[in-house]
Amino acid sequence: MKHMNPNWERWLRGCVKAGEDGCPTTLTRDHLARLTGQDRRALAAVAACWQLYASSDEDGAEGALSAIRCLLPAMQRSAWPVARELIAYAMDWSDRELLWSKVVPRYLSPLPATFEGNQ
């Protein structure tokens, strides 16, 4: 279980490269460098859940969203933006806002200040 699904990480690293076309992410290499081993394992599970959501019926999609809600506490809050960006790994960049609002309670909805560039 060394790499549950390393493709998500490779895809994300490609998106954070300077000048990458078609990737409107605001993540930086620093966001990825700060991930712990537990963050990476939780993010691998989240990536699999977004893929399940994208290819499932209504029950499967709701199950995927429930699983993501349960996985978020397993990672540092500063890793949540990475989980959000993984929506585009399974679907499209335009799906991020709608789907993220389905897994994060409204009172937690603003992303950590470090994600907005206020490090």
Image: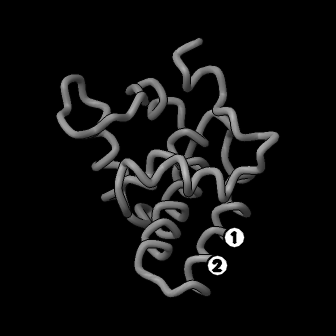
Which residue carries the number 1 mark? 66
Residue for point 77% across, 40% down: 108
Residue for point 63% across, 77% down: 62
User: Farthest residue toward the right?
Assistant: 107
- The C terminus: image quadrant: top right
Could you say which is closer to the camera, residue 89 or residue 40?
89
Q: Dot 1, crowdedness within 10 Å: few (<14), some or many (≥20)? A: some
Query: Secondary structure beneath disc 2?
Result: helix
Q: Position of residue 80 (x, y in %)?
A: 61, 42
Quadrant position of residue 65:
bottom right
In screen coordinates, is 80 left or right of 109? left
In screen coordinates, is 54 left or right of 103? left
The amino acid marked with disc number 2 is Gly
Could you say which is closer to the camera, residue 105 or residue 118?
105
Q: Position of residue 86 (x, y in %)?
A: 44, 52
Which residue carries the number 2 mark? 63
In the displayed structure, 27 sits above or below 1; it is above
The amino acid marked with disc number 1 is Ser
Q: Are marks 2 and 1 in contact (CB under 8 Å)?
A: yes
